[in-house]
Amino acid sequence: MRSRSDWLDAGLIVLGSAGLKGLRLEGLCRAMAATRGSFYHHFVDMGDYRRSLLAHYESEHTDRFIALAEELADATPHEQLATVANAVLAEHTAADAAIGRQLRGWAADDDDAAQTIARVDARRVEWLRETIAACGVPKSDASDQARAIYLLLIGAEHLSPPLPAKDLRRLWQPYLDALSEASR
């Protein structure tokens, strides 16, 4: 039997490739090579599944990266930022960008999705702001830099085709270099 996490991982893939319209029970069962019974073992209905999918996205695409930085408590803020940037870039693929685009589209018409995206955006920007400020950058400048770095990521996902990770790294590098200097 497929695990709850398997269903949610598959849902993100389906969402990225087929959009919200693709998130139908029959298509998910086909993608998972599993039965409806397996689905209903983990989820009450599609509403429950979609809410769980949003929580899974937040956990896997935000909480996991912040936890990675927190595991590096002995590292400098710049080292934490560089580690998280490398982890984000390692997973920055066209498929991942498609998931982000589809979620933002979903959020335009759904309160649960809108709240999730707003929470994800706020947590990511706040983590960046706090980390940049900890590098020695004044708070007002740290807020602007956090937004700029984050907007580069969101913009990179929305280009067609999405900006490759190597190009996004090149755009982020001046910020990372400046933060390295500021933290000395």
Image (cartoon, rainbow, N blue to C red):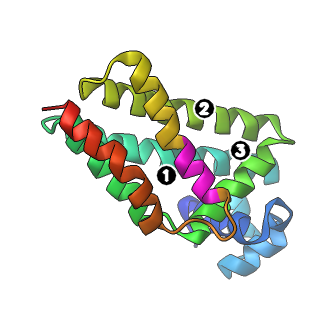
Q: Residue at x 82, y 68 (%)?
A: 22
Q: Above or below — where is 13 with respect to 101?
A: below
Q: Which residue is mark 2?
A: 119
Q: Is residue 156 magenta?
A: yes
| 161 sits to left or right of 80 | right
Q: Amino acid at mark 3?
A: Arg
Disc 1 + disc 2, Cβ < 8 Å:
no
Q: Is residue 134 left or right of residue 66?
A: left
The kind of residue tagged 1 is Glu
Real-space CA distance between mark 1 and mark 2, rounded to the nearest whole angstrom:
14 Å
Which mark identifies residue 51? 3
**Which numbered disc covers residue 142?**
none
At mark 1, the secondary structure is: helix
Decide which of 165, 67 is in the foreground and name it: 165
Range covered by the magenta-colored residues: 151-157
In space, the residues marked 2 and 3 are separated at their CA atoms by: 14 Å
Q: Position of residue 98 (x, y in %)?
A: 66, 64
User: Label 1: few (<14), some or many (≥20) within 10 Å?
Assistant: few
> Residue under circle 1?
60
Q: Main secondary structure of the magenta part?
A: helix
Q: Percent x, y for residue 99?
A: 65, 60
Confirm or deny contact between disc 2 and disc 3 (CB under 8 A): no
How far is mark 1 from mark 3, CA to CA? 14 Å
Q: Quadrant of residue 111?
A: top right
Q: Secondary structure at mark 2?
A: helix
Which of the 4 quarters of the picture holds residue 157? bottom right
